[in-house]
Amino acid sequence: MAIKSIIKCNCGQRIVAKDVMQTGYYLRLFGPSFVYVKFRCSRCKKLGEQFVKQEDWEDGILRDTPNEVSVEEKERFDQMGPIDINEVIDAHFRLDDSPSLGELFPTPDSSANQETSESK
Ligand SMILES: [Zn+2]
């Protein structure tokens, strides 16, 4: 699931939930309704506001890390810290143990040879 629209400051900084000061609905009788977001940019500290079409508004729009990592996972990853050299070596040996591509996808050499000899 891709986030269709994100909220950005004029400076290009992405606005996430912690930057938002106020949200509201801007309802219209005709045409699309909008979600109103007032924010303070975490980079340039300027106030800004943006209207997002209600149909484009989704739960992930203000999430710091959309889609791929949930909040729980992020906390777990943060606790695990960076990958150290032992983990890299371990992963390397695990790759060595796995079957080669040739074993996984045997090439039909014999049948291919037969076809070429028949065509001669
Ligand atoms: Zn900014």
Image (cartoon, rainbow, N blue to C red):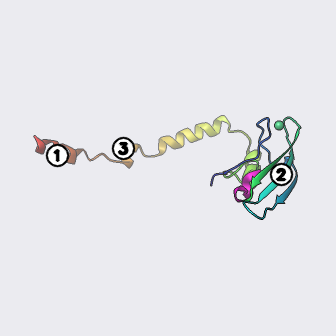
Q: Nearer the viewer, mark 1 or mark 3?
A: 1
Q: Mark 2 points at which residue?
A: 37
Under circle 1, the secondary element is helix
Q: Distance between the residues labelled 2 and 1?
A: 67 Å
Under circle 2, the secondary element is strand
The residue drawn where x is 41% and y is 43% is 100
Q: Which of marks 2 and 3 is in front?
A: 2
Q: In this view, does 96 lie to the left or right of 58?
A: left
Q: How far apart are marks 2 and 3 (CA)?
A: 55 Å
Q: Quadrant of the C terminus?
A: top left
Q: How crowded is mark 3: few (under 14 residues within 10 Å), some or many (20 or more)?
A: few
Q: In which quarter of the image is residue 48?
A: top right
- Residue 102's disc number: 3
Q: Is residue 71 above or below residue 117?
A: below
Tell which circle, 2 or 1, labels the residue nearer the N-terminal end: 2
| Three-letter code for the amino acid on which mark 2 is drawn | Val
Stretch of the chain drawn in magenta = 55-62
Ligand 1 shows up in the quarter that is top right
Q: Name the residue under label 1.
A: 115
Q: In which quarter of the image is the N terminus?
A: bottom right
| In the image, the residue with mark 3 has its CB under 8 Å from the nearest atom of ligand 1 | no
Q: How far apart are marks 1 and 3 (CA)?
A: 21 Å
Nearest to the observer: residue 86 or residue 39: 39
The residue drawn where x is 78% and y is 65% is 29
